Amino acid sequence: MQRSLLRDLAYPAVAVFIAFLLGALLVVATGYSPAEIYGALWHGAFGSAENVAWSLQNATPLVFTGLAVALAFRAGLFNVGAEGQLILGAFAASQVGIRLKGTAFDTTLSILPLALLAAALAGGLWGAIPGWLKARLGVHEVINTIMMNFIAALLGSYFLTVPWIKEAGSVPQTPIVSANAVLPAARFINPYTRLNAGFLLALGCVFLVWFVLWRTWHGFELRIVGLNAGAATYAGANVGRTTIAVMFASGALAGLGGAEQVLGVHYHFIKDFWVGLGFTGIAVALVGENHPVGVLLGALLFGALQNGAAEIDMMTTFPRELIQVLQAIIIFLVASMGYVRKRSAA
Amino acid sequence: MLGITKHFGALVANRAVHLAVERGTVHALVGENGAGKSTLMNVLYGLYEPDEGEVRIGGQRVTRLSPARAVELGLGMVHQHFMLIPTFTVLENIVLGIEQSKGGLLDLDSPRAQLQEIIGTYDLKVNPDALAGELSVGMRQRVEILKVLMRGAGVLLLDEPTAVLTPQEVEELFKIVRLLKSQGKTIVFISHKLREVKAISDRLTVMRGGEVVGSHATAGVTEGDIAEMMVGRKVLLDVKKAEAKPGDVCLSIQDVTLVGGGSKLVLDHVDLEVRAGEIVGLAGVVGNGQTELVEVLAGFRAPSDGRVRLDGRDLLEMDVLERYRVGLAHIPEDRHKHGMVVDMDARDNTILGKQRDEPFSRSGVLDETAILLEARARIAQFDVRPPRPDVRAGDMSGGNQQKLVIAREVSREPRFLIAAMPTRGVDIGAIEFIHRHLIELRDSGVAILLVSAELSEVLSLSDRIAVMYEGRMMDVMAASEATEQRLGLLMAGIHDKAEAAH
């Protein structure tokens, strides 16, 4: 499987290339110079150490949600609910970071692992519910994960109206988490950067997902469940149990993404920080061909584009929506290439 | 058809194929799977455009063939898989696609008269008002034949028409085919069953690897000759085996009952024993409970009642993997549905069901080297081609896929082997190989349950034969007492000749 990674990623690479070509046409057609616009985009994304840090910071939550979607996809499950799982994970992390602030546990040991664990557990359980519904009752996971996104978003907003949870501020928010629960930032790059140890955690998860999928029998069975449920039964894999376990693991990854946002970027749980993180994760998984390494590259691409957009806005008079056009073309091309490849293979 | 060549990418499916069918004859087109028969028929039927060559019908060159044009020219295709709408009547199914309207309403009266006439001419005995879904398989096939006759077909293409029929139904079909011939119809009969080809055809054309190997008058060749032409070498058609030396009861099935949808009994108090060192053949028309019985034995589903023991141990309390560990091996009837993962490579497929066992995994982690060695060993042992562990299973031929499945299951060193349709969709060369292996296993003391829709396979391999009908075990007999006639009646649910007379 790893052997074919390069070949698989060739398609998204071509898609990205074509997208930039079409984007250039758009730029020329509106009377701008592609060199200027793409120059700004490049500078924004990778022009300085600080900008690279920004890009990586943007990419970090997308690695988590992208992995969540990709892992489920390998088992034949379409987890559209990464956003909801991320919200629950973020909230759980914030509560550990706030409730245990100043306790002996906090001051002597570290509550950071505990906060991460709580986030994984909360996201995992939120994901396992649609997994269980699928395994036991055959309810399609797409429907349930979508609905649980709404529930999670409304729940997240509701929490911020509860007196003992919220704190006064310009936006609905919780108090700041304990300083000991914070994911350390890469201050050697820039004293103000929010690129944090969560990125390393994301890299660790990339490796972990790859290892589980291709180096353990759990992953072997997971992939068989995704490719051929009949063969999975034959091979002794319990399809229902695998479904629930995979949805738990998927949700846990998204939940860790939420923890990274709270403990490494915002330092508290604030309203609507989550918007788009889960859904972009789906695009990232798609562009990354549901391979952990592909997900990492996809997340870096989307994170960098997002950062480049800000630069285009600041340095040129061209609308930043160019980036959304590029993203849309990439997604469209990758999706249709997948379709064409499936057709020609059949 | 003159010099037909058809490429699919680099693959040449037909190379300079000539096929001449004389009017008013039965012409058999034989060859193994992948020999190019279907491609050729699809060219004739206008589904594929040939890269080279031409099609002539009645001496006229035909260009721009399409299915609609083929029908106009009097060609009619009877597919292997019937295409009937179960909730429509026979008449409605037949007029579908050639409906005529009278004042905006569907006109069924004039087609009905026409249909009655055709039914009468060919003695087809089909009730036009019966629901298609309630007809037997043989009857449904007649409806398909009626469909093409109603469209004025002079040439009928029958694609493996006997695959789903009981021996008696095959006889009935042959009667119809002879009658069609006597009325001046031309029939192209596609098959790989040598005996049937011998019995029904006037001429035959043999294809191998996309080319025509020879075209002969059927009377002038033996079954052995045909098989040799198909495979390209001498083939042993008869299975050579010594007398079985059955040991103790290895597998015992007692009173197994399975209630299906609508509280219908899919398995109706089934009893069966298989001894070590014997092959018990399970015969029956597809869909009479054999699949479900195998699923119960394999652990895919739990029966509503009954007991299954392997060497005295209760199998029903075990999950699939535990059953494998106590000596079960299972060649599933549908390798694409259960037996393999076509999107994985040969290597991964050789450890399907063994992925948790040492040496393939240790404390949860797969041992890549051990798996690769295993794949190489199995590939070498069964001469699987291409001999590459990294080839995608779906890219292998059916025969090689099946060899891989069987190699994997045999290497479990089982006590009891379920061989469900072990040679389905497999070419003659591989069939010979697989049969020889099953006999070897038997001789080494393995208990084998052979489930097959091919009666000749059941007859030639089994030591005892059991027949199932509508979930019931009709009878179990020594293979020496079984005849095709007797099995055929049991497969139709009839116990003896007296009953058959009704």
Image: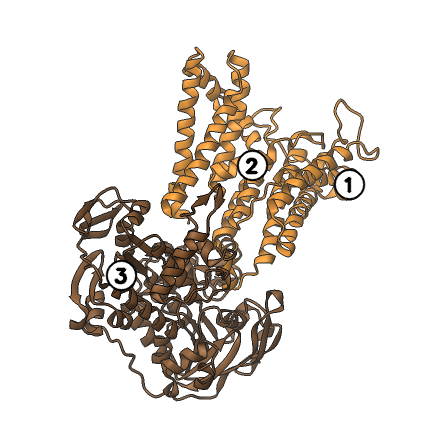
Chain colours: A orange, B brown
* 2 or 3: mark nearer the eye: 3
Q: What is the spatial separation of the Cα atoms under label 1 and label 2, in whole angstroms?
A: 31 Å
- Name the residue rendered at 51%, 48% in the picture: A74
Q: Is residue A269 left or right of residue A37?
A: right
Q: Which mark is residue A281?
A: 2
Q: Judge left or right: residue B491 versus residue B172.
A: right
Residue at 39% across / 42% down in the picture? A341
Q: Chain of mark 1?
A: A
Instruction: Determine whether the residue tagged by mark 2 lies in a helix, strand or loop.
Output: helix
Q: Label 2 amino acid?
A: Gly
**Residue carrying label 3:** B187
Of A290 and B17, nearer the camera is: B17
Q: Amino acid at mark 3?
A: Ile
Q: For mark 3, give the secondary structure.
A: strand
Residue B347 visible in the current orientation = no
Disc 1 and disc 3 in contact, CB within 8 angstroms: no
Q: Give coordinates of residue B223: x percent, y percent.
A: 22, 73
Closer to us: A204 or B84: B84
Evaluate whether residue B442 shows in this view: yes
Which tag is nearer the camera, tag 1 or tag 2?
2
